[in-house]
Amino acid sequence: MNKAASTGHGDALPVERWQTRVMSAPSLDTTVYLDRLDRVRAAMGEHDVDAVMLSVGHDLPYLTGYTSMPLERLTLLIVPREGDPSLLIPGLEAARVTAQPGVFQLLPWTETDDPTAIASTLVAGAHRIAVGDQMWARFLVEMLPHLSGVEFTRAVDVVGALRRTKDQAEIDALAAAGAAVDLIAGELQRGEIPLVGRTEADVSAHLGRRIIEEGHQRVNFAIVAAGENASSPHHHPGDRVIREDEIVLCDFGGTMNGYCSDTTRCVFTGEIAADVAEAYAILHDAQAAGVAAAAIGTPCEDVDRATRKVIADAGYGEYFIHRTGHGIGLEEHEDPYIVEGNDLPLAAGHAFSVEPGIYVPGKWGMRLEDIVVATDDGPRQLNNSDHSLIALV
Ligand code: ZN
Ligand code: ZN
Ligand code: ZN
C-alpha cells in the first residue's frame, strides 16, 4: 500500500484523499533533474543495475517533476544506464506532463496498446533491473514473461540515498514550508487561535485552513490534543472540549510545492502547572541537545541518544515512547530515521525532525518538534517559532 497509509502522522490520512488530491512537485530547472539523473546513473553503476523502473510514488516526481495519479493504467519511467530515460504514460495523462527536454522522452500509449509489452522492449537486454516499491504488482507480473533471466532489485537501493540527501532546491522548498507553519505556530502562541471552549476537532480544522492559506496545497495532519489526550502521541482530534488550565499539543504540517512541513508546539491555557513546567524545561533541553548533536558525521542514533539522555537523566525516560525523529522531504516520513540502531552518519543535506516528547498516561503529554537540516555550517533549524511553553492567560 502507499506510504501515506502506513507512516506515523499519515495514519490519520484516509487513502482516498491521497488518491484524489495528487500533488505536483515543483517544476524545477531542467539542470536539477539532469543532475539527479546523473547521480542515479552513478548509483546504478555502483549497484550493477542496468535499468530503473519507477511508477507511482515519490521517486517519479523527484526525477521528472511529474506526479502520477495511482491509476490502473501504467505510468513508468525507465532509466537505462546509458541513453535517454523514457516516460511511458497513458495518452490521456500527457497534457499533465511538463516536458523536460533532455531529461526524458515522453512516450504516451493509447488505449489499445499493451503498455507492459512496450515497457519490456524498452528494457530489453538488461540483466539487473531496479523496481520502485510502488509499481503495482500487476504490471511487473505482466512483464515477467518478457524478461526471463532478469534479476530484480528494489529501486530504493539506487534512489534512496539520493532522496535522503536534499539538494539546494529541496532545502529551499522545505525552508519555505517550515516558515509558513511557523507563522501559524506564532498565532497559536499569541492566543490568536482561540482554544478554550472549542473542540480539538474544531481547532484542528482551523489549523488546517491556515496551513492552506499560508501557501500549502495540502494538509497532511493537524493533531490537536488537550490535557490527558496529549499523552497519546498521534491522538486523533475529537469532540473533547479544550478547558482552562491544561496543556494543548498541536502538531501540524502539510505539503507546499511538493515538500512537507511538520512542527509541534504546546501551549498552556492558564498559569502553567508546576509538574508540567518542570517536565517542559527538560523537554526543551532535550530537544536543543538533539539539534546540537545533528552535526555532519554523527550517526543518526546518536541524535536520538542525545535527546533521550536528557530525558532519562531527569527521570522521565519511561515516558519518552517513540524515536526522536524522521526524515522529511517529498514525504512526511522518509529516510533518515533518527532512531537507535540507525548508524547512518548524517551528511550535508539530510533533513529530519527532532521531536522528543514526554507522555504521562492519563495526565498530560508534550512534544517539541523542529525540522533540521545537516549542513557544513552545523545544524540548521527550519522551524524557528518560540520553543517555550507559552501560558495563555
Ligand atoms: Zn509523529
Ligand atoms: Zn509532527
Ligand atoms: Zn514529525
Image: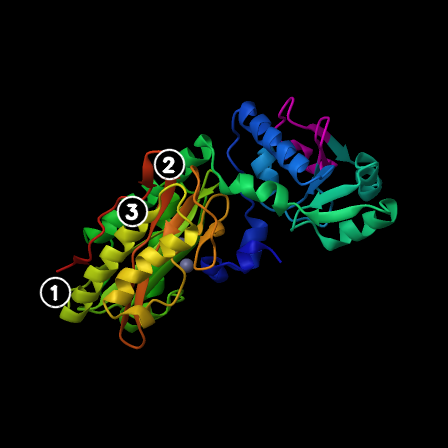
Q: Is mark 3 within 8 Å of ligand 3?
A: no
Q: Which element is circle 3 on?
A: helix
Q: Is mark 1 within 8 Å of ligand 2?
A: no
Vertically, is 228 above or below 380? below
Q: Nearer the viewer, residue 18 or 47?
A: 47
Residue tagged 1: 271
Q: Are marks 3 and 2 in contact (CB under 8 Å)?
A: no
Question: Which image quarter: residue 50?
Answer: top right
Q: From the image, which quarter does the N terminus lie in?
A: bottom right
Q: Which element is circle 2 on?
A: strand
**Between discs 1 and 2, the one toward the N terminus:** 1
Question: Percent x, y for residue 43?
Answer: 62, 36
Label 3: few (<14), some or many (≥20) within 10 Å?
some
Any magenta on residue 102? Answer: yes
Q: From the viewer's perspective, is 119 left or right of 100?
A: right
Residue tagged 3: 292
**Between discs 3 and 2, the one toward the N terminus:** 3
Query: Label 1 vs label 2: CA separation?
Result: 39 Å
Query: Label 3 vs label 2: CA separation?
Result: 12 Å
